[in-house]
Amino acid sequence: MNPKQIAADKAVSFIENGMIIGLGTGTTAYWAIARLGEKIKNKELDIKAIATSTGSEKQAREVGIPILSFAEIDQIDITIDGADEADENLHLIKGGGGALLREKIVASNSKKLIIIADESKLVKHLGKFSLPVEVVVFGWEKTFQKLQLLGCVPKVRLENNKPFITDNSNYIIDCAFNEILDPAELHEKINAIVGVVENGLFINLASKLIVAYKDGEVKIIEK
């Protein structure tokens, strides 16, 4: 079985009837949404959800997961999401799929954030994966320059040879740091730049990391 699918199935085992679930975005979260849909169809689960992207919301509706808005809830019980990188301290880089802002809003309003990943995503230090930074379009060139001063090689994300546009109508600048030794400090420095909406460092948000290996082994790292 696909390690991503194994990790997703394990995460879904923590979901209980009546919960409000945050649905992540990306190739790993896809499997969690699919599994939740199966359980609803088989009447094994009765849940409702909030999605972190238009893509995840579309998939959720297709598999029969009822979707709510933030106006309808007080708090999310558990969010299941993937990560582009994760370290042993449960610090993450997210945003490879372009949904980092909504993912962080959902994660920060969740009682628990369960991250699911295959073994390739677990690293000693974050940074090999370029850090996505969502920025407003107005004046993005100056925001780009200020990000560069932090010691990275920034690059505007493209799609079909044009700047990639997020679900929030912003740009993403992917910042290659190579190695991030103090994720919390970098998070603050980036978000202090005017023009930055949010960055893909998730600090002290994850409560559980489920890592699945090609041989079927599952490792759970908890806060």
Image (cartoon, rainbow, N blue to C red):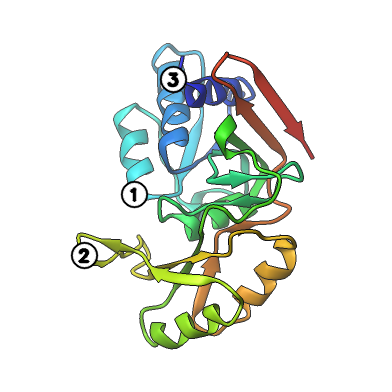
How dense is the environment of label 3, judged by Cα within 10 Å: few (below 14), some, or many (20 and up)? some
**Secondary structure beneath disc 2?**
loop
Quadrant of the drawing holding the C terminus: top right
Residue at point 56% right, 48% down?
Answer: 73
Q: Is 169 or 91 nearer to us in this picture?
A: 91
Residue at point 61% right, 38% down?
Answer: 115
Q: Is 38 or 83 nearer to us in this picture?
A: 83
Reading the image, the residue beneath label 1 is 54
Reading the image, the residue beneath label 3 is 40
The image shows residue 15, relative to residue 75, as above or below, that is: above
Residue at point 42% right, 11% down?
Answer: 42
Reading the image, the residue beneath label 2 is 161
Instruction: Report the amino acid beneath label 1.
Output: Thr
- Give how far apart the Cα atoms at labels 1 and 3 are: 21 Å
**Secondary structure beneath disc 3?**
helix
Q: Can you tell which mark lies on residue 81?
A: none
Name which of mark 3 and mark 2 comes first in the sequence: 3
Q: Is 159 or 20 nearer to us in this picture?
A: 159
Instruction: Report the amino acid beneath label 3.
Output: Ile
Mark 1 or mark 3: which is in front?
Answer: 1
Name which of mark 1 and mark 3 comes first in the sequence: 3
